Image (cartoon, grey):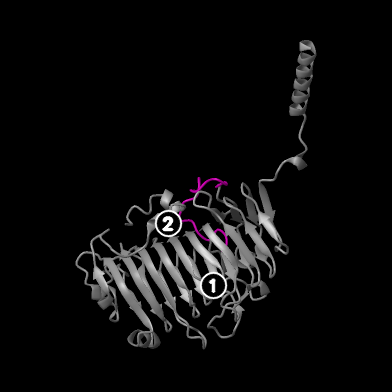
Amino acid sequence: MKKVFSLILVFASLIYVMNSCKPKDPEEEPETTVVISQNITQNTTWETGKTYILAGRISVVSGVTLTIQPGVVVKGQAGTGANATALIIARGAQIIAEGTATQPIIFTSIADEIEPGMIASPNMDPNMSALWGGLIVLGNAPISAAAASVQIEGIPASDQNGLYGGNNPDDNSGVLKYISIRHGGANIGEGNEINGLTLGGVGRGTVVENIEIVSNQDDGIEIFGGTVNVKNVLVWNVEDDGIDTDQGWSGTLDNFIVICGPNTDHALEIDGPEGSLMAAHTVKNGSLKGHHNSELGDFRDGARGTFENIYFFGFTDPESSEGRGDLSLSGTQTLENFANGILTFNNLQITPAEGVELSAIFKNGVAQYATSVALKANTVGADKSKFTFTWANQNSELVDFK
């Protein structure tokens, strides 16, 4: 019996060796890199462990859901003008992109050698921008514009997937959680770039939280109307505005960090309604680190809303030869809104440049709502513990934040 058993073991071993040495059919090997070259027209899942290459402007069309699993890396090919790469979630479509704190979903350039499982890029500097487009989510919630629905900036008018706006405040465009968007902002025309994350007419049924934007040529995140609530956003090193709001957005931004870079224009740019809908939003619990080329904020075009519990530091004296570090209200309507309590500020704190008065920083009477504090002595601002998943955290950019 022992001899028979030994022979069986030998025979089994030979079969194992023969099978292990047999060349494998390439079709049986799982693809780890997938090129996406056409619009997504049926429900699709992008899987953990894989990298997806956007070969152009890709839209998830109305009625279709794109699911992106934790840890997926999405890379946009290079291109400008009509060839700028971007991922568009059209009105009536959904994106379910739920990363985790240890497996965020990363959108970046094809030049980035990052692979699934990494947070920091192995070859890209965090100041390289305009290498692809960005992520655009569009919905059917109300906007305040020239019409009930309009074309989003950054997308050619010929592409009907770029339309946004409607009459459903509860519209649901899906879920964005633990997302990092990097190196975007490609030009499609003179002065017309794509934001890192664009939200156009997105409804309050959509979940947007734990978002990082790194080195975008245009704004970090820009919100055009809609009712969506957004929380836990970090914007680092963008080349226009950190947070930009437009067209009567009526949601809330809660817990955010802006780290200005050498080309950041405004940490905050707040615009008012452009149509008859007089909606307003709330921005609260933010910490903003300045740069000598950057302004704290510009509130313009009839800006309205509530801005509270916000801490500023690292901005330059606005009255110096190189300083731009002020917060201003621009335009008659904006000033009237402020005077009438339609635009309000509460609990603003700042660590100012040495010897600078609050009235020189917070213009147009806003200084009465601001106080001066020592660095890291602030009692308002962001909770930085929510941003452990970010490249900024791995790069030690949050050490100056309380």
Range shown magenta: 114-134
Using the rendered view, name the quadrant where residue 258 is placed.
bottom left
- Most extreme residue toward the left is 355
Residue at 32%, 57% (x, y): give it.
Answer: 402
Asked if 379 appears above or below 361 in the picture, the reply is: above
Q: Are marks 1 and 2 in contact (CB under 8 Å)?
A: no
The answer to which of 239 and 227 lies nearer the viewer is 227
Q: Mark 1 or mark 2, which has the lower sequence index?
A: 1
State the predominant SS element of the stretch in magenta.
loop
Q: Please give the label number shown on residue 386.
A: 2
The answer to which of 12 and 38 lies nearer the viewer is 12
> Which residue is label 1 attached to?
204
Residue at 52%, 72% (x, y): give it.
Answer: 228
Q: Position of residue 167 (x, y in %)?
A: 60, 81
Q: Is residue 177 visible?
A: yes
Q: Position of residue 136 (x, y in %)?
A: 58, 67
Asked if 1 appears above or below 297 in the picture, the reply is: above
Q: Amino acid at mark 1?
A: Arg
Q: Position of residue 173 (x, y in %)?
A: 60, 68
